[in-house]
Amino acid sequence: MKNPSSKGDILLVDDTPDNLRLLSTMLGEQGYKTRKVPNGALALKVAKSAPPDLILLDVMMPDMNGYEVCRHLKADPQTTNIPIIFISALDDVFDKVKAFNVGGVDYITKPFQIEEVIARLDNQLMICNLQQQLQEKNASLQIEKEKSDRLLLNILPAVVAEKLKQDRGSLAEQFDEVTILFADIVDFTSLSSRMRPIELVDLLNRIFSAFDRLADRYGLEKIKTIGDAYMVVNGIPLPRPDSANAIAQMALEMQAEIQKFHGNSEQSFQLRIGINTGSVVAGVIGIKKFSYDLWGDAVNVASRMESTGLPGKIQVTPATYRLLQDRYRFEERGRIYIKGKGEMTTYFLVEN
């Protein structure tokens, strides 16, 4: 990292002491911090322990020439990004090409003019500074993107969120077998009149958070909460051949979970739960404040199963009953009137 009190930290590598003194003095007068090393092995050690902003590297040195030093530096993740300017008496074009091939960013021929050295140093340090700024901005953008993605996944199913990011057109899709659950807290309206709003919201948050954990456990898709109502489905956005089973398991556990919560009167809550299985259309509509939702007769009937149900009971339609009758115990409720459907025989899911 560049010292703010200097123009840059420069590592000088040359086996000739006079060259090191001359460069160090000239660069120091121009506001650079310099460190001097007389050979390649020491240069590798110093660069790794305290990476400089830039290296001025001689080519012709004993034991390890500048090209070899550069190869080692570029092969090490800790030093690979340090810009290296070769400074040498060799002025053949092939020497310069070799310097660039091993990773050098510039080449200065001796004898040099200090103005040229300064100009080339400033140019490379400016490029490094711009690259660092770009990396920092990219890192910041990546963090913001991850935040945005997490937020989107809290609103939409992962598959739908990915489609939305790729702008694939309509996000509405039909699913032939989806099981829908609606749950409502019994007498919650009367409870709300006896609790402060902040206490009420905190209680709902704890209850629905417990339900969310159950939905995650069974791989279900929570659709929404409206007041004290909770809606979750199975079979979207990825079809599942047995959508009803996991919903039934969740419904039974929801009834057990609600017993753990109490209002001001310390009386346990009860749920009315309704379940139906059928064909729906699911997707995202609109362009502002969008949400993933379901439409279709199967959704309406599931809602009616909840609203016409009984406290502490899980009411299901014949469609759901037929899918689960061999694995769960049911009680036939009999025929009841369902708005928009007429009379329907319904069942109470009792246990597995």
Image: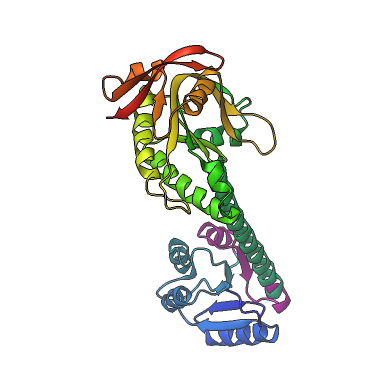
* Residue 79 rendering spot, x and y as whole percentages: 48, 67
319 lies above or below 146: above
161 lies above or below 301: below
Q: Please state the total of marks drawn on the protein image.
A: 0
Q: Does the magenta-highlighted stretch encompass residue 110?
A: yes
One can see residue 23 in this view: yes
Q: Nearer the viewer, residue 57 or 35?
A: 35
Quarter-of-image position of residue 238 = top left
One can see residue 175 in this view: no
Q: Is residue 164 left or right of residue 273?
A: right
Q: Nearer the viewer, residue 23 or 210?
A: 210
Q: Is residue 118 left or right of residue 246?
A: right
* Residue 133 rendering spot, x and y as whole percentages: 64, 62
Tell me where the magenta segment starts and ends, as one range.
92-117
| Residue at left offset 43%, top offset 61% | 75
Q: Point out the image quarter for the C terminus.
A: top left
* Residue 54 rendering spot, x and y as whole percentages: 58, 72
184 lies above or below 132: above
| Residue at left offset 55%, top offset 43% | 190
Q: Nearer the viewer, residue 331 or 277?
A: 331
* Residue 163 rendering spot, x and y as whole percentages: 56, 32
Query: What sort of colour scheme is used for the picture?
Result: rainbow
Q: Is residue 313 left or right of residue 298?
A: left
Q: Does the magenta-highlighted stretch encompass residue 60?
A: no
| Residue at left offset 31%, top offset 29% | 350
Q: Point out the image quarter for the N terminus.
A: bottom right
